[in-house]
Amino acid sequence: MLVLLSSVNGNNFALLYSRNMNKSRNYILVVLIITSLLLAAPIRVLYRVDMRQDKLRTLDRGSGTYFSTVDLARILACRYYVNPERQKIVLYIANHRVKISAKSSFIIIDDQVFQMPMFTKVIGEDVYVPAEAFFSIIKRTVIPGLAYNSKRQMLDIDVVNFNIIGLAIEDKANGTIIRLQTKDQFKDGNISSFIHDNGWFYLTVVGGIADSSVIVRADYGRAVRRILVDQLDESVQLAFQLRPKIENQEVYLNRDPAEIVITLRTPVVDSMARLKGLRERWYLNTVVLDAGHGGKDGGAIGRYGTKEKDITLDIVKRVGLLLEKNTNIRVVYTREEDVFIPIAKRPKIANAVNGKLFVSIHANATSNRKIRGFETYLLRPGKTADAIEVATRENAVIKLEEQENNYFELSDEALIMATMAQSAFMKESELLAATIQSELAKRLKSPDRGVKQAGFYVLIGASMPNVLVETGFLSNAQEEKMLKKPSYRQKIAQSIYQAIVTFKNSRELVLAEE
Ligand SMILES: [Zn+2]
């Protein structure tokens, strides 16, 4: 009898049962089954929240211990649902859906499929699952504070103090920022990460216990498709399936608030958003026209008393009028009257109106009265002595301003810094400057002095392509005479207007090809 019992396993039972049906020895088998069920020692459960002790009914099979899922639901006080027809049981544990099927080795947690080495067993409406395999899966996914000792048939359920407690994902134009809220700050050495070729980003946190129910329910944004949390004894691994291709990743620890910050740089989140962003950025809908000097700052003065501030304002208004009449470009003036505008305020005005182009208009002067011609400047460290002279003179206005200490010395270093900020717009500025020069050359008889570089305060800080046009020399008698003529100023305005239109068209051609 004893020998027989120990050799009996679940499958042989059915076989024995049917074989013996006709031989009127049913009673022996019923006794056998009952004995077997009783002999299968229950799993002792210690529930540490309240030190409650309980027992999980089990089946002892040759292949190991199986326990009752209905019992588990009762012990965990979790909601569960039984579908007797489809022989399925679903447990709702800590915001997770654990789906168990009869006579299957698969369990599905949320949408993730796990396989156990053995099939589940059915007794009535209850499903018995292999204890060791099942608890190992549950520990990794649903209840990290669970420990099962198969030898002693002990299940210890501890309340876990999660230390990874939240997740926020932000989509940016050039990537995604993933912030994992943590209870305390982790050490640098405890965090490792990598991107797999299969499009998954893996983050391993040694000592991390993630509240996966919160994490998998976060807003994934555009870039993250799925998140899987794999809780191990010593660490937790978070896996993020990403939509876009990642160029590079960076993980750093934030102290206040405590978080693990992951930046994933993508070439673009999606091409439509990129195109839209580009269009918005480059679409030339606002031009800022800056009339040099004004008010107490007269600028250069010609031999016949012509003031630079008047010439510049007149030309700017002519350019603006042409743009307003012939295009749908919005024109913003830094000044429309003879008023003093601090030089640092001019690019600020341009940025505030979200200008796409900044054109500063001036008239030149130098000690050599023979020199004449027109030139256009870019913001860069001055290359030639002439360029530096012009910049120095144009910058001299700062002395007229009340708060002189707002300005730093335009050392080469400071200029390089300012120029670096400008570099994104440099190519555009160069194109615009060259176009202005060629348009002026078409209409004026004065010499084309070309595109130059110098450090102009007025060009610093404008977040858009920007140029400074020196339309002619007031120090040259002949050019002063010309600049006094409205028809000449109209030619200059026409040239600058045409250059802006050409620039706009070439910009939008690039956009159309994207
Ligand atoms: Zn000037």
Image (cartoon, helix red, strand yellow):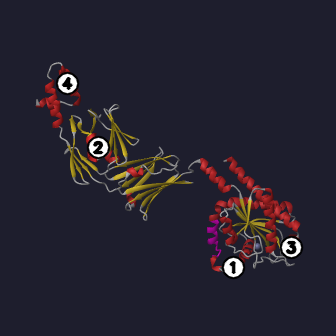
**Horizontal relation, residue 182 to residue 427: left or right:** left
- Discs 2/1, front: 2
Q: Name the element at disc 4.
A: helix
- Quarter assignment of residue 431: bottom right
Q: Which of marks 3 and 1 is nearer the N terminus?
A: 1
Depth check: give the residue in front, 33 or 222: 33
For badge 1, the amino acid type reads Glu
- Given contact means CB atoms under 8 Å apart, are the residues at marks 4 and 2 in contact? no
* Residue type (three-letter) at the residue carrying disc 3: Glu
Image: magenta residue range: 407-420
| Closer-to-camera residue (202/494) | 494
> Between 352 and 262, which is closer to the camera in this rendering?
352
Disc 4 to disc 1, C-alpha distance: 105 Å
Of badges 4 and 2, the one in the foreground is 2
First in sequence: mark 4 or mark 2? 4
- Please, is residue 39 above or below residue 403 in the view? above
Q: State which image quarter holds ligand 1.
A: bottom right
Question: Residue visible at 79% across and 70% down?
Answer: 313
Instruction: Provide the secondary structure element on which disc 2 rests.
Output: helix
CA distance separating discs 3 and 1: 27 Å
Of the numbered discs 2 and 1, the one sitting upstream in the chain is 2
Which residue has dot 2 on it?
73
Mark toward the viewer: 3 or 1: 1
Q: Mark 3 points at which residue?
A: 480
Q: Residue 29: name its quadrant.
A: top left
Confirm or reject: label 3 Cβ below 8 Å from ligand 1: no
Q: Is 241 placed above or below 124 here? A: below
Residue 508 seen: yes
Residue that carries the numbered disc 1 in the rendered image: 401
